[in-house]
Image (cartoon, rainbow, N blue to C red):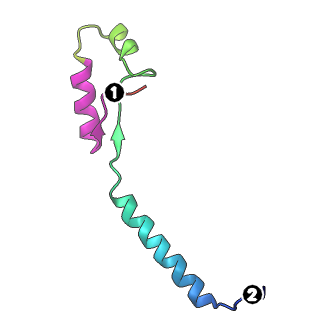
Amino acid sequence: MPASPTTLGKEMAIFAVRLSRERKKESQVEIMGKFAGAVGNCNAHVVAYPYVNWPDIAEQFVQSLGLSFNPYVA
């Protein structure tokens, strides 16, 4: 089957539309953070400072960075 001709302008327009779609998706992504150690249960934190309420401190710290807190991580 013979190839159909195209133009650079058309291909650039396709690229621009696709890029615009992806940028819209990117702006809707929720950026999440954690501060609960390697496996997500604050073990090292508690060993170092056992009398600190680590879940609350972790949430405050992550939110202070402008991120959404994710308490359940692995």
Q: Residue at x 35, y 46 (%)?
A: 31
On screen, residue 28 above or below 48:
below
Residue 54 percent location from the top left of the image: 26, 19
Task: Rate crowding at label 1 as few (under 14), some (14 to 19) or many (20 or more) other CA atoms within 10 Å.
Answer: few
The label on residue 72 is 1
Residue 46, quarter of the rendered image: top left
Q: Is residue 20 magenta?
A: no
The answer to which of marks 2 and 1 sits earlier in the sequence is 2
Task: Find the residue positioned furthest to the front.
Answer: 1
On screen, residue 65 above or below 73:
below
Q: Which residue is mark 2?
A: 3
The amino acid pointed to by label 2 is Ala
Picture quarter with the N terminus: bottom right
The amino acid pointed to by label 1 is Tyr
Total number of numbered discs in the rendering: 2
Q: Is residue 67 magenta?
A: yes
Q: Residue at x 24, y 25 (%)?
A: 57
Q: Residue at x 22, y 32 (%)?
A: 60
- Which residues fall within the magenta stretch? 54-72
Task: Rate crowding at label 2 as few (under 14), some (14 to 19) or many (20 or more) other CA atoms within 10 Å.
Answer: few
CB under 8 Å between discs 2 and 1: no
State the SS at label 2.
loop
Residue 63, quarter of the rendered image: top left
- The foreground one among 34 and 61 is 34
On screen, residue 62 above or below 66:
above
Tell me how far mark 2 sits from mark 1, CA to CA: 53 Å
State the SS at label 1.
loop
